[in-house]
Image: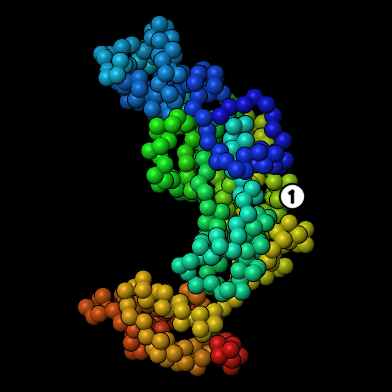
Amino acid sequence: MTTSTQHPLGSGLLATIMADESFRPSEPGTLAETGLPISLIESLLIKRLSVVGLCSGRQLANDLSLPFNVLESLFQNLRSRQVIVHQGAAPLNDYNYTLTETGRDRAAIATRACSYVGAAPIPLMDYVLSAEAQTIRAESPKRAQLKNAFRDISINESLFESLGPAVNSGAGLFLYGEPGNGKSTLAQRITQCFGHEIWIPNAIFEDGQIIKFFDAAYHQRSNDDSDTLLSAASYDRRWVKVQRPTVVVGGELTMDSLEIRHDPNSNVSEASLQMKSNCGCLLIDDFGRQRIEPQELLNRWIVPLESRIDFLTLASGKKIQVPFEQLIIFSTNLEPCDLVDDAFLRRIPYKIEISDPSPKEFQLLFQIYCERFECEFDAEVVDYLLKKHFIEAGRRLRRCHPRDLLSQIRNFCTYNDLPMEMRPEYFDRVVKSYFTAVLGDGGNKSPNSQAKRVQQ
């Protein structure tokens, strides 16, 4: 899909028009329809040939993710200019190509100018339109979708009453509470509420710059069986069909991660984290403990959070306008009001506390994890654990405890060649090492008040 018209970001017009059908990039039929300069496609071809040495025209087209019939005229042009030559016939009425001496010189110059070799990029405006068409704000997940996303984990039913409207709004939210209660897990599951896969580009082209976009660390390729249908029905292979992304960043977050990063040696740029999370979720995990101050993040995002538009700077110095179309989730162990001011909190309208589990939910969590660890569940042993190692010791319950304690019991049983079982003496053994290492004195503050809380 290509266009030369300007589109007002944030208007939602395209999302409204395409709400009833999936965005699907159409295959270009000519070089002009790629939206790219012919010189760029030519440089990608000769750089690829310089890497592989000898290659058929169809394979070169496949490497660039462009239709072979679109590139045929370019092959002829390069051959007439003695940049490439035939090196024997190839199947399907094709030829094998290699670079001439002139071609190798041009490839070396092109590589020094920009070392990117791979799928041809798509124009920036095509990406802008795609993000607008696939925004999560065009969807309205209901209770059924939310329950389905959390179907295999334990979640307090009352939490759905707060979490559901927050997810439905697409406006962003704070998840706060004590560590170990599953805030990060909840945040990562939220993306599943929106369902549907999306199309993202391998790379973007703007103002002579190539910006790499697809990132295997955040983007999971679709396993949809419809891929076989897509091969029969043409589509633009410069795009990749992926699951809606969940980009998770923690203490390693820096201001540089929020900008387009440029490598001066390769002259290739990398999309910012918020661009990669568009049409999905961006989770700022352990918010308040990053290398940057919360106020710096506020100053950087105060306009995008309001307008749903972000402004980024290319290596050339040109400012570009891109969508800010993701559900932003801040997960923190601290009170939100202790981290940021009212102006920032106003732009994140939902603040949801993730509280400690009740003894009943604690039992349910053990039951869930016993199935995963292939261990028979014993409610009486959990009652023993609760009484001796939580109520009497004044420890607070955390949702991570069943998983972690069972994991240690499994390791103990494996080491001693014993069957995996829930036995009181096993818990006595692993609790001593687990809580000493993880909680220390912090897990035993105010025993009386803690015990009362567990008994509630």
Residue drawn 67% across and 42% down? 16
Judge whether residue 68 can be spotted in this image.
yes
Please tell me how many numbered marks the rendered image carries: 1
Residue 223: x and y, percent? 40, 47
Residue 278: x and y, percent? 59, 46
Q: Residue furthest top?
A: 80
Q: Is 329 left, or right, of 40 in this rendering?
A: right
Between residue 426 and residue 92, name the one nearer to us: 92
Q: Residue furthest left?
A: 417
Residue drawn 41% across and 15% down? 72
Between residue 93 and residue 373, name the one nearer to us: 93
The quarter holding residue 82 reads top left
Q: Which residue is mark 1?
A: 306
Residue 91: x and y, percent? 27, 19
The quarter holding residue 49 reads top left
Q: Is residue 13 above or below residue 54?
A: below
Q: Is residue 331 above or below residue 451?
A: above
Amino acid residing under circle 1 = Glu
